[in-house]
Image (spheres, rainbow, N blue to C red):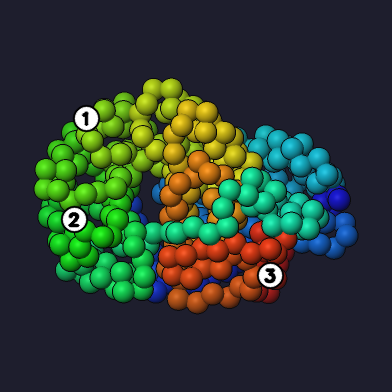
Amino acid sequence: MRIVDIQTGTISLPLTHPFKTALRTVERLEDIVVKVIAEDGSVGYGEAPPTAVITGDTVGSILCAVHDFIKPAILGMDLDDLEAVMEKLDACLVHNSTPKAAVDMALYDLWGKAQGKPLYRLLGGARERFETDLTISVNPTEEMVRDALEAVERGFGILKIKVGKEGMADVARMAAIRAAVGPGVKLRVDANQGWSAQESVSIIRAMEDNGLDIELVEQPVKAADFDGLKAVTQAVDTPILADEAVFSPQDAARLIDEHAADLINIKLMKTGGIYQALKICDLAEKAGVECMIGCMLESKLSVSAAAHLCAARGIITRADLDGPSLCSVDPYSGGPVFDGPSIAMTDLPGIGVGDVPCGNWQ
């Protein structure tokens, strides 16, 4: 099944609430969508969110990468040799993980459709249903408490709380949220690189001393501060989740070898897609290091691809796939069923999302 064309378009979706982290504030999802077309007319879909503060990818760089580098590299290749196509995709650019991820998931979508099976079964089939958390944006404490209570009322039993802007004040913020939601709700803390290593140790220890029962702390220090991440991991009892510090299998191997974090957050937009993410899963399985599957500000299209990976591999024990729950509308048909905190896989082949409502394919 030869690849005969690759096209891009755009999708714009309003968010239910502004998305605020220590790195950015976003009020609307504005993503690039990708369509890979095979010689028999079948199509596969992918999505690329421009997240310059994390991946370095912008709208312009994504479009350039897809049309000027990726498309010429893999056009005419045969998906029956999926590994060769994926290796060519990875090698055609040094970085640009986001456009690679969009094309990668579109290729896997096509490949799964050709096999007539849902992708998660082809990649391992570990589970058919799992639970995601919901992100609470960083805001004044009173607003975050209200948002947390609203999330619990919607059925979410795991909340990921964005912090990292106010240092030790984050301890009081988390204490207020814990008091409001009670002991039965799991709380994850995401500092988005907002603290120094020394601050991280002080803040996390204070949360421990106050009995806040934090399940994990995600990327407390700058992505490049590997030594700082390792120092924090070794100094606290709360599990530390590496996010921006791990883009590639090589990053994961170093982190595992040096025990610089307890857990790894896999995001397709960091790894360049499912193919490289599977390599991280293999490394993690051998080392017994559990993983989380996460997402950027993405719609149901690419989050569905991440859901298939989560359902495929047992080493992924936690999910942060709340992108569709943060959008106020869902323009897609098919795909996994997102019902509040529950994500259920279906028997639809490939990733399973139907035609993407984009009228500006180029």
- Residue 230, image x and y in percent? 31, 28
Where residue 347 sits, quadrant-wise, is: bottom right
- Residue 211, image x and y in percent? 14, 48
Residue 356's place in the image compared with 91, above or below, is below
Alpha-carbon span between mark 2 and mark 1: 20 Å
Q: Residues within 10 Å of mark 3 (few under 14, many from 20)?
A: some
Task: Please indicate whether residue 188 sits to the left or right of residue 332 in the image.
Answer: left
Residue 354 circle label: 3
Which mark is first along the chain, 2 or 3?
A: 2
Alpha-carbon span between mark 1 and mark 3: 48 Å
Q: Residue at x 66, y 38 (%)?
A: 90
Residue 235 circle label: 1
Residue sitting at the far top? 257
Residue 174 circle label: 2
- Per the image, label 3 sits on a secondary structure element best described as loop
Kind of residue sitting beneath label 2: Met
